[in-house]
Image: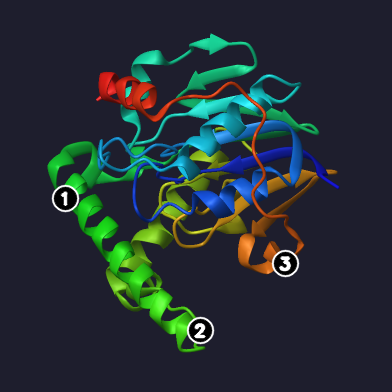
Amino acid sequence: MKRNVDLVVISDVHLGTYGCKAKELLQYLNSIEPKTLILNGDIFDIWNFKKSYFPKSHLKIIRKILSFASTETDIYYITGNHDEMFRKFTDFEIGNLQVCNKICLNLDNKKTWIFHGDVFDASVQHSKWIAKLGGKGYDLLIMINNLTNWLLVKMGREKYSFSKKIKNSVKNAVKFIGDFELTAAELAIDNGYNYVVCGHIHQPQIREVVTKKGSCVYLNSGDWVENLSALEYHQKKWSIFYYEEHKHLLKEDVSTEFPEISQIELMKIVTNFS
């Protein structure tokens, strides 16, 4: 039985990289029937895209999104920094699918501001080559982490996240996340929004931020590389979906009924964007 959800936000899938957990994401998408699906940036990773690596599991995510678009689901593709090439198609619409840089929604009379969040990242805005280099290093770290976790599982031990450990132990990383959340919330309060929804920093979160000027709820959808998380809004309430907490309830991968997209055709499309 699929769950009906008013709104779902996913971000930072990074299709086209070794770290992307496409199989798990497909299980999640196959378990829901959202009225609105928001793809909040970095769905594709064009920065680190390799012609030699785009497995069928990644293609199935595209087919699933297209299958949603062929139904009654409204889909917003918000561009991020890793898929910034799509920004040339801002305001492009086809059927129920719209490409944009940000959106403002009214959720049960609550003003909601949704954008990826890379606008707050100085390394992306002013030193793009450093950010891209960091992206490649991150992808390598995830590859090593995947191998390590495979060995740990074989030994009957729990999985371990290198990047989470680094983020939680490095003071600058912790400060960056806190500054990011506060900046987004303060801007939302200044502009009269009740909710502000971001991605980008791979840190799922729902928390209220209060300043002298007012308050708002800051939300982040996390990612499908480390946290395997999504935001859901249903019956006037927000929640974070964690794959690891619900995977025992999800069915294994089933084929998505939608016209085939060949791997060669997809390579041509993505190459033209980059």
Q: Residue at x 58, y 56 (%)?
A: 229
x, y (%) of residue 199? 48, 46
Asked if residue 76 is positioned above or below residue 112 in the image, the reply reads: above
Q: Which residue is mark 1?
A: 133
Q: Which residue is mark 2?
A: 158
Res. 215 in view: no
Q: Quadrant of residue 89?
A: top left
Label 2, residues with CA under 10 Å away: few <14, some 14-19, many ≥20? few
Q: Nearer the viewer, residue 28 or 181?
A: 28
**Residue 248, which numbered label?**
3
Label 1, residues with CA under 10 Å away: few <14, some 14-19, many ≥20? few
Quadrant placement of the C terminus: top left
- Which tag, 1 or 3, sits closer to the chain's start? 1
Dot 1 and dot 3 residues touching (CB under 8 Å): no
Res. 128 in view: yes
Disc nearest the viewer among 1 and 2: 2
Q: Helix or strand or loop: what does disc 1 sit on?
A: helix
166 relative position to 241: left or right: left
